[in-house]
Structure formats: structure tokens, C-alpha cells
Image: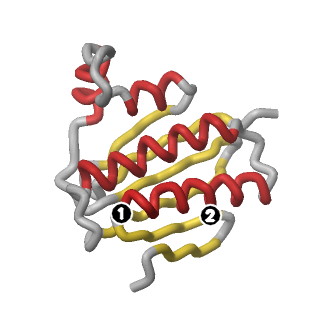
Amino acid sequence: MQEIVYKNIDKELQITFNADYQNVNKVVKNILGYIETNLIPVSAFDIGVTLHELLVNAVRHGSASDNTKIVHVVVGTESGRLYIKVQDEGLGFDLEKKLCNEKSNVLEPHGMGLNIIKSLGFSLSYNRINNEICVSKELSN
């Protein structure tokens, strides 16, 4: 399998990549290009930070930095919102517990990613069955 596979299907960008930190920056760059090309009105900074946090978490925690594992990303728009879905091969986590725990770790160099994403105006949800986190944000006008 190739390291990164891109598919543009039904107004969605679908990406599959080996869980490797080097792939994270490539995927973020390509998604930002997709958003710019499709004139999706959203802050490139907000998307860049959010994607980086989600994908690094998928590689580090979900895939235990095992580059034989796969990460899936879907980016699209629906009903005036941008959505990003990230799925990995990990065991999953408790989103609410993570958000609560992260609030107490402000002096640590890690553990703040999901709260940063939330502070950028994204809604977060987690599907335990598919081990998939979904973030969405209302599009700018």
C-alpha cells in the first residue's frame, strides 16, 4: 500500500495514510490546499492547528506510533459546516473524560490538544464503535 492515498468523492476528501509523523505534515498541507482550492470559508490557521492535533493524536495514541497501522481522514462540508473525521486502529478513549482531564494540565507540554480544538470554535464528538473523532465548525461568510 502507498503511504498516503487521496480520494475526492462526493464533495469529500478522503485520505488514508500509514501512521507516521512524517505523513502528518503532508496530509495537513494537502487538506489545506483542498480547502483553499474549493474556496471553503474557514481559517487556515484554525484548520491547520486542528488537523495537526487530531492526526498527531491518531499516530501517537491511536496507533502507538506503529507505522504499519492506518489512519483515515475525511474532510467535507454539509449544512454550512466543515467537518473533519479521523479514525485510527487504537483502542479508543473517553472524550468527556479527556476534556475534563486536559483542563488541569495547563502547565504540561502535552494533553491540551482537544481543548485547543474546542477553543477554536469546533464541536467535538466521538464514535466509540468506529473509533472515530469528528470535529465540525460553522463556515465563515
Q: Is residue 11 left or right of residue 112?
A: right
Which residue is at 57% across, 56% downward?
A: 75
Among numbered discs 1 and 2, the one appearing first in the sequence: 2
The residue lying at 61 percent from left, 35 percent from top is: 46
> Which amino acid, by three-letter code, is at mark 1?
Asp
> What residue does disc 2 label?
12
Q: Is residue 105 left or right of residue 139?
A: left
In the rendered image of this protein, does residue 140 appear above or below residue 67? above
Please identify, in this view, whether the residue under mark 1 or under mark 2 is nearer the observer: 1
Q: Position of residue 89 (x, y in %)?
A: 25, 62
Pinpoint residue 54: horizontal percent, then vertical percent.
42, 45
Residue picked out by circle 1: 20
User: What SS does tag 1 mark?
Assistant: loop
Relative to the observer, which residue lies in front, 1 or 136?
Answer: 1
Q: Residue furthest left?
A: 91
Q: Residue furthest bottom?
A: 1
Q: Is residue 72 left or right of residue 64?
A: right
Does the CB distance between marks 1 and 2 fall below 8 Å? Answer: no
Residue kind at label 2, given as amino acid type: Glu
For label 2, count other residues whose C-alpha is less than 10 Å away and answer few (under 14), some (14-19) or many (20+): some
Where's the C terminus, which quadrant?
A: top right
Question: Residue at image x 56%, y 73%?
Answer: 6
Q: How many marks?
A: 2
Position of residue 130 measured from the top left corner of the image (x, y, whole percent): 30, 58
